[in-house]
Image (cartoon, rainbow, N blue to C red):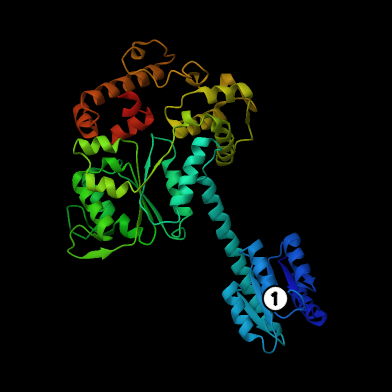
Amino acid sequence: MKSRVLVIDDEAAIRDSLRTILEYEGYEFVGASSGPEGLSLAGADRPDAVLLDIKMPGMDGLEVLRRILALDATLPVVMISGHGTTSTAVESIKLGAVDFLEKPLSVDRVLVTVGNVLRQGALGRENRDLRLAMESRYEIVGESPALRTVLEAVKRAAPTGATVLLRGESGVGKELVARAIHRNSPRAGQRFVQVNCAAIPEELIESELFGHEKGSFTGATERQVGKFELADRGTIFLDEVGDMSPKTQAKVLRVLQEQEVERLGSARTTKVDVRVIAATNKNLEESRDRGEFREDLYFRLNVIPIVVPPLRERRDDVPLLVQHFARRLGEEHNIRPRRFDAAALGALGRYRWPGNIRELRNAVERVLIMAPGDVIRLEDLPAEMRGGVAEGGVARADGAAAAGGGTGTLREFKDTAERAFLVQKLREHGWNISKTAEAIGTPRSNLYKKLEQYAIRQETDG
């Protein structure tokens, strides 16, 4: 496909000369004799590059430049300057033009410049498309009052450098909120580094967060830069922050207070400029009162608290989320477009969603793949989502369900029994993850996976 170049110049001779040069090289030429006409063509013809005269009657080139870049900031604009307008051309570069050509125009200079800016424009559009694709992956979907409250808090918190603490159940989308804060902050062009404090073994989390020097401990065969250093000038997201050990908490507190880190095995400190967003599904106040979470760190993190509501408190968003996931997952799995009928959407809206948005996404993915028809109907939904447990909450953990009542398959029976067993053991050990994992003979990381799999939470199962 030919690249399209828009030339905006009030001199017909210049336009004709550039038409000859560009068309001879295989470009498509579009010409405009004034600023307003050029703006109209820029919007209608979607050129790949613009050559714009600085000095024109009426609307001058600088004003046209401002308006073009307001329409499309990635569109490369080259200014054409005449005698005595070189200083203005330099000013145009500051405004966003990518280059300028001086009259009289040189054929070679025109072609080299146009070739360069077209490559630059293609790269800019590719980066924009990749950024938009990434942002859509982390899009926050919904219009409910509960969600609007969160988005309003994000809007106020994002432009600041204040530490944010996100509270909410597992699966509600705390990561999406954290990314929205970063995306709308002055640090948006820098790194967003995520750390799941619950998924990293206790003996490795300090190395992950702060880095280590070669030989600082057994297995440290190479020097490693920590997550705080990687996030320098950007944002670090500490997910499940309530699961950090007291020793790690003390070091994180130091980073917040001093804005510096010290790698394991090193006596030298490194300054970092990091914004911290933390998240937890635990009651940190209770953990603080039990002495499991440092009070000084709690106050450092809890500068701007934002509570992300569970899905059952934003039921009006369920149809929108279903459509969003159906579209995205259909593209991801190369599945033909499907729609959910009213009965299916109604059942999904009534279901309590103990696993919140993560559970909803998994449910949509499952029925998109397994349902036989073009329309997802009530009977295509998992049994527990058809209305039987809509208001009853999560699966029972008192052993009654595990006895066989209400389970249809061997898999369902095993899952129900395992969930009941885990809840019972957690209660016996005061919901202390480490003690429970040790008591039942499983790694702590595996227990966390089970808690997420069965949507087990102290708030609802305690």
The front one of 178 and 221 is: 178
Residue drawn where x is 78% and y is 76% of the image: 19
Residue drawn where x is 50% and y is 32% of the image: 314
- How far across and how far down the image is residue 372, in percent? 60, 25
How many numbered badges does the structure rendering display?
Answer: 1
- How far across and how far down the image is residue 338, in percent? 63, 32
Q: Is residue 234 left or right of residue 321?
A: left
- How far across and how far down the image is residue 44, in percent? 76, 60
409 vs 141: above or below: above
Q: Is residue 46 left or right of residue 120?
A: right
Q: Which residue is mark 1?
A: 61
Q: Quadrant of residue 284?
A: top left
Q: Is residue 223 visible?
A: no
Q: Quadrant of residue 119?
A: bottom right
Q: Is residue 142 visible?
A: yes
- How far across and how far down the image is residue 252, in percent? 25, 52
275 vs 165: above or below: below
The quadrant in which the C terminus is found is top left
346 vs 403: above or below: below
Classify mark 1: helix, strand or loop.
Answer: helix
The quadrant in which the N terminus is found is bottom right
Q: Amino acid at mark 1?
A: Gly
The front one of 228 and 402 is: 228
Residue drawn where x is 62% and y is 72% of the image: 117
